[in-house]
Image (cartoon, rainbow, N blue to C red):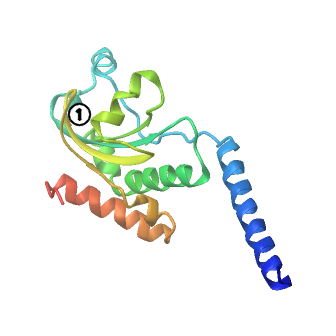
Amino acid sequence: MKPKAIITAALLLFVGISLAAIVVKEMRSEPAPIESTATVQTKTEAQSTNEPIKALEETHFVVYYFHGNVRCTTCNAIEKQSRDAISTMFADQLDAGDMEWRLVNYDEPENTHFRDDFELAFQSVILTEERGDTILRWKNLPDIWTKIHETPQEFEEYVVENTVDFMAGDES
């Protein structure tokens, strides 16, 4: 082999090993827990405090972030930026009970049904319109995986615009 071919092969091998090491490190890292900013109130809790249970009796919207047991930096960033966009731009709806933010680990045995319910293959943001325990319609936001690598403003715009459109009944 020529020296140039040997050096090229060695550099490609080095890059491949480096990328593999980064992926392994990402997968092994223990992410800091992210606290949800919205409180999910059950019907029983509302009845015991004599608070209105509007969100459970009438149509309301739920923004889900579904994740698994293994969470990388990108997954945590998607969760944080989605939650921040929703809690900032829809604070009034969250406070009024017209919208909820729910963080769900679909690897937990009681949550595995969500994989089939929403056709989940990986971490996702799902918008739903619900009445009580019934999901009337839903929408996946698949471009979160590309938008997270753009500016935070572009990511927020994507989440907010899709949420506004969904709430207005736009199915696209």
Figure quadrant of the C terminus: bottom left
Question: Which residue is identified by label 1?
Answer: 55
Which of 138/82 is in front? 138
Q: Which residue, as the protein is rendered here, is positioned at the far right?
A: 3
Q: How many numbered circles are shown?
A: 1
Amino acid, disc 1: Ala
23 relative to 105 in the view: left or right: right
Give coordinates of residue 102: x percent, y percent. Answer: 39, 38
Q: Position of residue 131 (x, y in %)?
A: 17, 32
**Vertical relation: 69 (above or below) 169:** above
Crowding around mark 1 (Cα neighbors within 10 Å: few <14, some 14 to 19, many 20+) is: many
Residue occupying image coordinates x 49% and y 63%: 148
Helix, strand or loop at mark 1: helix
Which image quarter holds the N terminus? bottom right
In the rendered image, residue 83, in percent from the top left (x then y), is placed at 44, 50
Which residue occupies the foreground of this view, 45 or 51? 45
Q: Is residue 111 above or below residue 161?
A: above
Q: Quadrant of residue 130?
A: top left
Expressed as whole percent of the image width and height from the top left, the position of residue 100 reads 33, 40
* Residue positioned 44% across, 45% down in the render: 122
Q: Residue at x 33, y 19 (%)?
A: 49
Which residue is drawn at the image coordinates 58% and 39% (left, top)? 70
Question: Residue 59 falls in which quadrant of the image?
Answer: top left
